[in-house]
Amino acid sequence: MITQEFVRKLVVKNDAKIVLLVMDGLGGIQHPELEKTELEVAKHNILDMLAAKSECGFHYPIGVGITPGSGPAHLGLFGYDPLRYEIGRGLLDSLGVDFEFQKGDLAARGNFATAAYDGAITDRRAGRIASDASAKICKILDGAELDGVKIFVLPVKEHRFAVVFRPSDGKILSDRLTDSDPQKEGLKNLEVKPTIPEAAPAASVINKFISYADEKLKKSSPANAVLLRGFANMIDIPAFGDVFGLRALCIATYPMYKGLSRLVGMDVAKDCDTLISQFEALKKNFDKYDFFFVHIKATDSAGEDGDFSRKVKAVEDVDLCMPDILSLEPAVLVVTGDHSTPAAMKSHSWHPVPLMVHSKCARFNPVVKRFTETEFIKGSLGRVPASSIMTLALSHARRLAKFGA
């Protein structure tokens, strides 16, 4: 595998702009009745036009047959080895809402959920409650102190929140813990357990917090339970700009992706709450940065909800905005997803992810006519690891020097 240390030695600077457009959960599988994927049903004339003149194929976020989480999948897209840098989702969500970490803090990602009288989870997302309702519930739980540990409960978006545990004695609460989230309806909240002896204090206080939340929310509806996962301490990671020689800007609506971008040293655009505002931010900042990470969440949300038609529309909505990108004439435009989220599966999957690299240097296959999985099988890129996408983009931007004499 090509390392970041190796790439750093080859980087050269110029004025070429790179746009990485990520439609979260982009890949799909055939609808059981239509026998077509979401991309095959969607009308996306601009993406089709680009595909016919681009290098097309697929990437594996982690490896063949491995279903990735969003955190490691995006690390791969950013040119990092996701197996080397394991980052808990709690850290990313917390950074995404601008929480200032201190030494010893332990973060977790939370879902407000609906539980039956016997504790069995009937809805892991509490009906995707509105963000303002979620924020009010966070206020109920925020500020508790258990066993000398102060607890911060931070609204993220809709049913999702982040929780940070801060020990008053400054010691580090280990993140070597199992999740409480059973990941399926019909099961009860799991006991958080330490995977190393040193994590026992953290497990104890977290289980007490879950019981505390259950008591506080027992009269609440539909959000009357909390599910925790993705425990994480702060980590050291090379800065994106130092590795690739790029001034980078994240343009995202969802906090987790802002958090990951901040973690690797990207700037984050403000006031990007809609698809239209995201592309306006791209135009506004195009002269200030070299690299733009534009993240689209709607495709993934629809896939996880099993809503095939909504995912189709989310792709079509992006296609309508593509002229906004093309009018800026970036040297390189990469369009892909972080992972596949087929609506037929209602979850992330292991399927390879469609990948398109568009530039004046692209060596395309004329037989590719549409931006779809079936067409991309014919593409010139074949199948590559996600961590190679950054080197591909840099090469197309003429930002990598030749290796060797």
Image: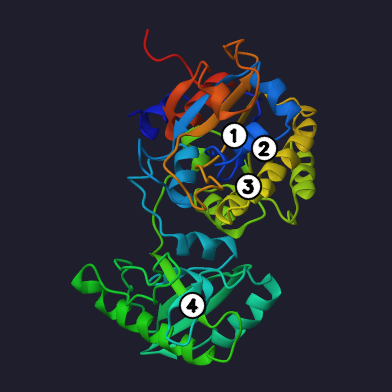
* C-alpha gap between disc 4 and disc 3: 28 Å
Q: In which quarter of the image is residue 38?
A: top right
Residue for badge 3: 308
Q: Whole-Å distance between the Cαs marked 1 and 4?
A: 37 Å
Q: Which amino acid does label 2 sit on?
A: Tyr
Indicate left or right for 209 with 372 as reference: left
Q: Which of marks 2 and 3 is nearer the N terminus?
A: 2
Q: Which of marks 2 and 1 is nearer the N terminus?
A: 1
Mark 4 and mark 2 lie on one chain; the one further toward the N terminus is 4
Secondary structure of the residue carrying numbered label 2: loop
The N terminus: image quadrant: top left
Q: Which residue is drawn at 65% across and 82% down?
A: 136
Residue 150 as seen in the image, left or right of residue 248 = left
Element type at marker 4? strand
Q: How crowded is mark 3: few (under 14 residues within 10 Å), some or many (20 or more)?
A: many
Q: Name the residue under label 1.
A: 36
Can you see residue 158?
yes
Q: What residue appears at the point 75 percent right and 53 percent down from the top-left corner?
A: 274
| Furthest-top residue in this view | 405
Quarter of the image for residue 134 reads bottom right
How far apart are the alpha carbons under marks 2 and 1?
39 Å
Q: Are marks 1 and 4 in contact (CB under 8 Å)?
A: no
Which residue shows up at 68% across the image and 42% down it? 312
The Cα–Cα distance between marks 4 and 2, rounded to whole angstroms, is 40 Å
**Residue 121 x %, y %:** 46, 75
Query: What SS does tag 3 mark?
Result: helix
Badge 4 amino acid: Val
Q: Give the residue number, with chain letter if any, for mark 2.
A: 289
Q: Residues within 10 Å of mark 2 (few under 14, many from 20)?
A: some
Alpha carbons under labels 2 and 3: distance apart? 36 Å
